[in-house]
Image: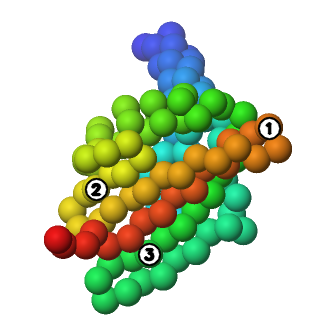
């Protein structure tokens, strides 16, 4: 029995290390949207406003990944979180729309995340 305790402790430590190595970071103002590895959020650019129709949120992140890699990451990841992509760079979920804009800035990509209530046609 004494041998099981150190083995169990070792297994727990290894599991915690592996879990933290694969931990996903999320946007500070939208806790349900992951921040792609290699992007760094610009906390000072964050804006949150609650309106009667829903939240209006803006966030920004910068990194060295290519625009196509960033688009592919969010096109693959967001649908797993319930978002639908009706067109490139635009996602909808429930009554909310998320728009991603990617721009080149000083050799890096600036990604802007904009959340707004969905409009009905």
Q: In which quarter of the image is residue 92?
A: bottom left
Which secondary structure, mark 1? loop
Tag 1: Cα neighbours inside 10 Å, few (<14), some, or many (≥20)?
few
Q: Nearer the viewer, residue 81 or 92?
A: 92
Q: In this view, does 94 lie above or below 38?
A: below
Which secondary structure, mark 3? strand
Q: Which of marks 2 and 1 is nearer the N terminus?
A: 2
Q: In this view, does 77 lie to the left or right of 24?
A: left
Q: Name the residue under label 3.
A: 56
Q: Where is residue 121 in the image (x, y as percent from the top left)?
A: 17, 71
Find the residue positioned furthest to the left.
121
Q: Earlier in the sequence, mark 3 or mark 1?
A: 3
Q: Which of 41 and 110 is in front in this view?
A: 110
Q: In which quarter of the image is residue 39?
A: top right
**Residue contact at pointers 3 and 2, CB within 8 angstroms:** no
Tag 3: Cα neighbours inside 10 Å, few (<14), some, or many (≥20)?
some
Tell me the CA gap for discs 3 and 2: 14 Å
Task: For residue 8, say whether it is visible.
Answer: yes
**Residue contact at pointers 3 and 1, CB within 8 angstroms:** no
Of labels 3 and 1, the one closer to you: 1
Q: Which of 1 and 9 is in front in this view?
A: 9
Tell me the CA gap for discs 3 and 1: 29 Å
Tell me the CA gap for discs 2 and 1: 30 Å
- Give the number of the disc on residue 92: 2
Q: Which of 79 and 87 is in front in this view?
A: 87
Residue appearing at x 65%, y 31% in the figure: 65
Q: Mark 1 points at which residue?
A: 107
């Amino acid at each position: 029995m004494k041998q099981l305790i150190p083995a169990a402790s070792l297994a727990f430590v290894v599991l915690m290390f592996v879990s933290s190595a694969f931990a996903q970071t999320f946007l500070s103002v939208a806790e349900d949207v992951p921040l792609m590895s290699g992007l760094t959020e610009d906390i000072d650019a964050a804006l949150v406003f609650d309106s009667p129709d829903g939240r209006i949120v803006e966030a920004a992140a910068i990194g060295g990944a290519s625009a196509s890699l960033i688009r592919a990451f969010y096109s693959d990841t967001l649908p797993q979180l319930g978002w639908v992509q009706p067109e490139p760079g635009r996602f909808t979920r429930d009554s909310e729309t998320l728009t991603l804009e990617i721009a080149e800035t000083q050799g890096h990509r600036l990604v802007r995340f904009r959340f707004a209530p969905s409009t009905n046609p």
